[in-house]
Amino acid sequence: MTTTVPHPDPTTPPDYRQLFDALLSPLLLLRPDFVIVDVNQAYLSATSTSGSDIVGRSIFDVFPDNPSDPTADGVVNLRRSLETVVATGRPDTMSIQRYDIPSDDGTGFTERYWSPVNAPVLDAAGRVAFVVHRVENVTEFVHVRRVGRAQERARAQTQMRAERMEIDLFVRAREIDEGNVQLRAANGQLEAAAGQLRQQKEAKDRFIATLSHELRNPLAAATAATEVLALDLPPGNPVLAVLERQLAILARMSDDLLDATRSLTGRLELVRQVLDFRTVVRAAVADAEPAFARTGRFLHLDLPEEPVPVDGDRLRLAQLLGNLLTNAQKYTLTGQHTHVGLHRTDGHAELTVRDEGIGFDPGQGEELFGVFTRAAPTGPSTPEGLGLGLAVVRTIAQLHDGSVSAHSEGPGMGALFRLALPCAATRETDAVAPAVRPGPDPAPSGLRILMVEDNVDLATTYRMLLEHHGHRVTCVHTGHGALKAATGEHFGLILCDIDLPDLDGHTVARRLRAAPDGDRPRMVAVSGFNGPADRARSLAAGFDAHLGKPLEIADLDTLLRSWPPDRDS
C-alpha cells in the first residue's frame, strides 16, 4: 500500500520559529543593548546552555571572560564588534576568537574558539532593531592546526569550515574593493577641486599683477603731467600738493598690489649684502618724517651707538620699515607719537615701532598680516589703502629668516610691531655706515632722446619734461617705429617701454644691438615691472639700465650723471 505524503500548502506562511531552530549555524538574537532576545537550538547545543537560563540576560553576563585566563579578551572584542554594528547599521565579521564558556558542572570554563559574524536587523525607519549574532565553533580546527592531528573527520570538517571562511574572506575583499573604488573617486574629486582652486588662485594673482602693471601707465602720465604743471605754478601751490599726495597714494597702492602678488607667489626677490641696519632705519625714518610733520604727528628714533650688521636687501628692508611707518601714520591721530627703536639682543637685531594710535583687539595681532586685512573697520573715516602693506612686511621678514609680530592691549591703546632679524656674522668694521659722497655733478643736457612709449599721454608729458630739461625728444609709439627712427637718425639716449603693441622692448634692444654698422646709443628700459628678474632680463637684452614707472626725472638725471661721457649725444 502506497502512502502519499501531502505537500505543504504554498500559500501558508512558513513557521519561522521552526526554521530558526532548524538552522545548523548557532544563532543569538540580541537587542541593541545586547540583551538576549532569542536563541536557536544549534547555539544552545554549542554552548551547553538552555533558553530559560540565558534569554532576557545580557550576553556578557551569560558569557563572561574566563577569570583564570589573564589574557582573555573575548568580551572586549565582541563588545567592540556589536557596538560597531549598532553604530553603523552594517554587518561586522570578526576574526577567530578564543572565548571560553562556563563548563557543564559550573566549576570552571571550557576552552572554545569561535568564528563570529554580527549582522543588524533594521526597522522600517532604518534603525537597528536587533543584532543577529552567528558563531561557528572552530575549536577543533584550532586544535588540529596547533597540534598537527590529521584525522580524516577533522580534516573534512576543517575543510568545510575553511570553505565557509573563504567565502567570508571573499565577501570582505569585495567590500574592500568597493571601498577602494569609492575612495579613488573621492580622491579624484578632491584633486579636481584642488586644481580648480589653484587655477582660481593663479587667475587672481595674474589679475592683480596685470592690474598693478596697467595702473602704472596712467599713474606715470599723471605724475609726469603734475611735474609739468609744477614748472608753471608757484612753489607750495595747494592744488599741486593735493595732486602730488594723491598720486603718491595711488602709486603706493599699485606697488603694494604688485609686491603682495610677488610675495604670495614666492617671486619676491632679494639682493642681499651685509649692511648696518641703523643706516636703513635712519633713512626710512628721515623719509617718513615730512609726512608725519605735515599731518601734525610726531616721530621719534632711538638707535644704538654700535653698528647692527644684518645680511639683507637694503631696499626691501627700507620698504618693510616704510610700510610699518605708513601704518603707524594712518592709525594715529593728530598730536600722537610714534617711537622707532633698534637694538641688538641674543644675536638678533630687534626693531620696534610703537604708536599711540587706535590699537586693536589683542587676539587680532596675527590676522593683521593677512592679505587685504585692515585694523580699522571699513567706513567714511577709514584711512586709504588696500590692506596689503603688512602682508608684504611679513614676507620680507621671512625672506630674511626673521619674524614680525603685532601686539596691542586693546582698542585705543596703541600698537607695537616687533621685527627680529638674525645679526650677520661679521666684524664691526664691516658694518659701518656708507661714507658721505660729495654733491652730484650736474646732469648732462642737450641729449637727442628717442622716447618709445605706446601710451600717447605718457609720451607727451615725458617729452615736455625732458625738453624743459634742455633735451631734444622724438616720440614713437611702436617697436617698429623705434627701429625705423633709430636707424634713420642718431640718438644719444633711447628710453623704451617694454610692453609695446607689436615688438616688445627686449626685441627692440636686441635688434638695435645686433645692427652691424649702427650707432650704439645708451638704452634705458622703462617698465611697470621693476623687480630684480625684470631688470636682469632688460640688461640681458642689451639695455644699459632699467627704470620703473612712474619714471622720475630725478632718477633719470641720477643715472645720466653716473655714466661717463664716453658717447656722443
Image (cartoon, rainbow, N blue to C red):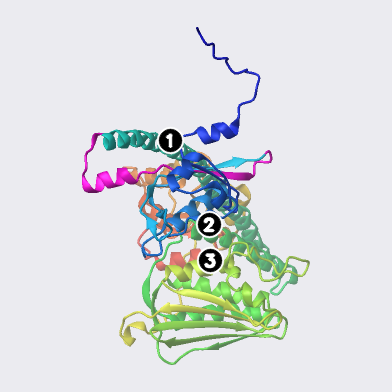
Lower position in the chain sequence, tag 3 or tag 1: 1
Q: Residues within 10 Å of mark 1 (few under 14, many from 20)?
A: few
- Whether residue 266 is visible here, answered yes or no, is no
Tell me which segment is drawn in magenta.
124-152
Circle 1 sits in a helix, a strand or a loop, which is it? helix
* Residue linked to disc 2: 261
Give the percent coordinates (x, y) of residue 469: 55, 63
From the viewer's perspective, is residue 393 above or below residue 94? below
Alpha-carbon span between mark 3 and mark 1: 58 Å
User: Label 1 amino acid?
Assistant: Val
From the viewer's perspective, is residue 418 above or below residue 11? below
Q: Residues within 10 Å of mark 2 (few under 14, many from 20)?
A: many
Q: Quadrant of the C terminus?
A: bottom left
- State the mark number for residue 171: 1
Give the percent coordinates (x, y) of residue 118: 50, 44
* Residue linked to disc 3: 392
User: Label 2 amino acid?
Assistant: Thr
102 magenta-colored: no
Lower position in the chain sequence, tag 1 or tag 2: 1
Alpha-carbon span between mark 2 and mark 3: 9 Å
The front one of 519 and 78 is 78
Give the percent coordinates (x, y) of residue 368: 60, 69
The answer to the question of whether label 2 and label 3 lie on touching residues, with beta carbons closer than 8 A, is no
The residue depicted at 76 percent of the width and 70 percent of the height is 381
The answer to the question of whether label 3 and label 1 lie on touching residues, with beta carbons closer than 8 A, is no
